[in-house]
Amino acid sequence: MAQVKVPIVRNILQANERLAAENRRRFDEAGIYVFNLMSSPGAGKTSLLERTIDHLSGRIKMAVIEGDIQTSYDAERIQQKGVQAVQINTDGGCHLDGNMIQQAMDSLDLAHVDLLIIENVGNLVCPAEFNLGEHDKVMIFSVTEGDEKPLKYPLMFQTSSVLLINKIDLLPYVDCDLSKVRDRARQLNGGQEVFEISCRTGEGLEPWFVWLEGKVRERQSRRSARA
Ligand code: MG
Ligand code: ZN
């Protein structure tokens, strides 16, 4: 019976790839830049979104899809910023998939959106395996998690275009060697953009904002080139 398990898992991932490709087509037709934000629980995903929205609002139109196992606290936090947000409750599920994103998109008005942010369920394992149609995967790692995390969860580091190392204001109080994190991440993914930040103090966020705005403008210019 055990050998049945592998083909089933493969079918799920293949079906997901098809849905992710459909999502990507819709994003590209609309000229929307999309990133999939992943991390462990409590690493600071929603705090990063709040900072990012505060910085970019007025210049870039944003929408957010929030994934959580239960509750709608995070979507409510985002809506308080005046940004469209839809909550997906996975009801126990430990990652978002392409189908959930397709359904969430139908309850957003994406006609005038430039940037769509998908906040995945807090989990360092399967979110890295399920593409959603995003242009980039972005991961947040908190220094409170310890410097061995890249060794334990390599796929997350390998698939993320961006690594945000958060809570650097706490470095004096935790056992985390930042140079080890950087070296281990570089060995797994040499092309990764790395930003060292504190969502609490705001330190180091400016280069992230610049990188992100560059990505959004690049998408917009492709849209206007077609129009
Ligand atoms: Mg959150
Ligand atoms: Zn999962």
Image: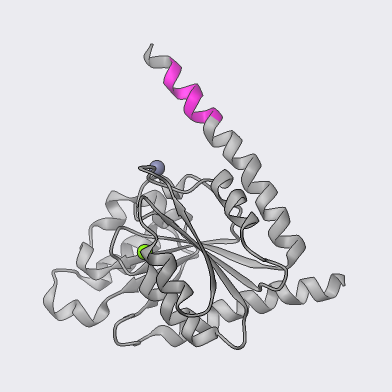
Based on the picture, tell me whether residue 9 belongs to the magenta stretch. Answer: yes
Residue, far top:
1
Number of on-image labels: 0
Give left or right: position of 108 versus 96: right
Q: Is residue 43 above or below residue 14?
A: below
Q: Quadrant of ligand 2?
A: top left
Give left or right: position of 69 versus 132: left
Based on the picture, tell me whether residue 143 belongs to the magenta stretch. Answer: no
The quarter of the displayed image where residue 147 is located: bottom left
Residue, far right:
227
41 and 203: which one is in front? Answer: 41
The quarter of the displayed image where residue 67 is located: bottom left
Image coords of residue 12 (percent x, y)? 53, 32
Give left or right: position of 198 versus 24: left
Q: Is residue 197 above or below residue 67?
A: below
Image coords of residue 165 (percent x, y)? 33, 72
The image quadrant where one finds the N terminus is: top left
The quarter of the displayed image where residue 143 is located: bottom left
Residue at (38% x, 70% y) in the render: 46
Q: Which colour scheme appears in the figure?
A: one colour
46 and 219: which one is in front? Answer: 46
Image coords of residue 58 (percent x, y)? 59, 88
Image coords of residue 131 (percent x, y)? 54, 49
Residue at (74% x, 65% y) in the render: 30
Provide the residue span drawn in magenta: 4-11
24 and 149: which one is in front? Answer: 24
